[in-house]
Amino acid sequence: MYGRGLRSLSILTVAAMALALSLVFFYAPLEAEQGFLQKIFYLHVPLAIIALCGFVLGGLLAVMHLRTRDSRWDMRSYVVIHMSLIFAVGTLITGSIWAKGSWGHWWVWNEPTLVSFLIVFLLYATYQPLRFAIEDPERQARYASVFAITAGAFVPMNFLAVRLSSAYLHPRVLGSTSNLPGSMALTFLVSLIAMALLFATMCKYELTAKHTRAQVRALRRLLSGEDGAPAPRGRSAVPSTSGPMTTPAAGRTSL
Amino acid sequence: MNAALIVAEAPALPLNTAGKYVAGAYIVVFVIVLIYVAIMGIRLSHIERDLGELLEIKKAADAAEEKPLPTLASTTGAQST
Amino acid sequence: MKRTVGALLRKELLVELRTLESVPGMSLFAVTTFVVFHFALNKSSVEGDLAAGILWVTLLFAAILGANRLFVADADQGGFDGFLLAPVDRSAMLAAKVITMLAYLVVLELVAVPAFALLLLGAPLGPALGNLVVTLALADIGIAVIGTLVGAMAVQTRARDLLGPLLALPLLVPIVIGGARATAPLLVATHSSGPAARWLLTLGLYDLVFGLIAYALFDFLLED
């Protein structure tokens, strides 16, 4: 059951986000150089960190899929990568807003995190087109897993390369996370935890919805009688959960 | 480099210029989450509609079964929950 | 394993020699691109960063053209099935394809680099040649590995010509960074030092990481 624990997780997420926002606006001190604008830091950096961890996690889940051939791992990998892509878009937009506020430009090339994110975003944006271009569901899942693992290994490599290429040219534009005073560090930590919980909740939400839809389809097939052949899926980028392995048999509810 | 100058000129950026960027950033994230909630809401209503259809199909199937085999009515009734 | 790789390699090179469908195209593309750059940038000679950028971008796009075609014959004419039926280690195909791609790249560079020196480069290439060769060699390994991996993925999809470059370009960005930063100081008139070790190490690390990943994952792409 993907939905088990969803309610507790959501409540926890709401609480954490509320706490984080309160800390950001009522507790964390104003930073000397950037002033109020620096508050974006508590939004942009957690988004970035969670997105990156999500991409790597997607690669790890893909490894599990290739090892066990269980399509549920592929489903989890797909959802995590999808969600990380959304968080990556959020990172780029908030980073761009921060750059505009700091330097007057909507895009800066000398902020290595932002540049690395652009490249990673461009890479993962091909994940769904790749899936969509392969019709056979088993092959689609397999190729997607190979891609997820390759891309997951690419993420740290890319960060290293971009960081190297700009380190000695320009100072960091948007500040770093090291040597933060205690109150800022606490606020940052809470924001990070809240963002991680948000990510987990949204992924769980997505997985539950997909699984529910698959169960409804399976039920429809059962009810339309034994002679009803499964309806052709057509082309889809979404991993299938209605294979013979995951059709719920009578009495089995845990997945 | 010119940190001292910057601090001297604008020690803390006034709310009416920096504020809109911060607000913009937080609003963007909020909207992204809201869009996601909306998409999930649409999916939920689709699932609800599908389940309603399936319930109708099942009821129709039960009703069709009841008529030609009245002797089995008790077992059919016990099974159809 | 070695014999399998040797046999596959011989097949690849024979096919290429007979059909000449990849390498001449790649080389011609590179030279033509240099001409286009001349008109686009409105410069008769370039140096340093600009020169390195033009050279690497051109090599990259020519390489992608070659990588796109690497598996097409196998996919369209049953080469995969034939290989899968043989009782050999599947990594042999990876090794053979990577070496083939490397060979294509070497020939490409043998044509493109002199053409570049002739057409656009404002600085003498002679003194920097050794360092340039080393940098190109390291980068070529990475390009070959990624090109093979992406080529194998893209060939089974519907939009293979589009998806291949789309997948390969972001993955190859670290190579562009390492290669261009390493060669920029080589392409100046008063070149003093060699490429910074940092960039060569980056290229080497990239080759190692993705070589291992390709080796681990390639089998999964071949299954049916």
Image: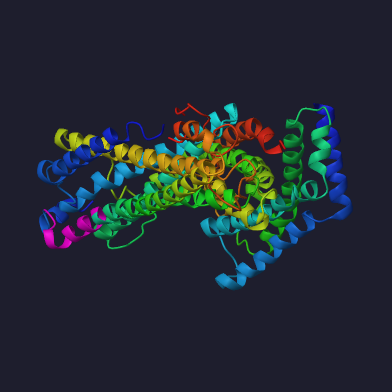
- Scheme of image coloration: rainbow
Q: Residue furthest front?
A: B71
Q: Which residue occupies 65% across, 57% down?
A: C159
Residue A168 covered by magenta stretch: no
Using the image as rendered, state which of residue A158 and residue B31 is in the foreground.
B31
Residue B20 covered by magenta stretch: yes
Q: Which residue occupies 35% across, 50% down?
A: A91
Region of the chain picked out in magenta, as a range: B12-26
**Residue A114 to residue C5: above or below:** below
On the rendered image, what quadrant is the N terminus of chain A found in? top left
Using the image as rendered, state which of residue C88 and residue A74 is in the foreground.
A74
Q: How many marks?
A: 0
Q: Residue A89 in the image: state x and y as whole percent.
A: 38, 52
The part of the image, by quadrant, that contains residue A57 is top left
| Residue A65 seen | yes
Q: Residue A75 in the image: state x and y as whole percent.
A: 50, 38
**Residue C165 to residue A201: above or below:** below
The part of the image, by quadrant, that contains residue A12 is top left
Q: Residue B20 in the image: state x and y as whole percent.
A: 19, 61
A91 with respect to B11 (left or right):
right
Q: Report the magenta stretch's main SS.
A: helix
| Residue A160 seen | no
Using the image as rendered, state which of residue C54 and residue A47 is in the foreground.
A47
Q: Residue C170 in the image: state x and y as whole percent.
A: 54, 50
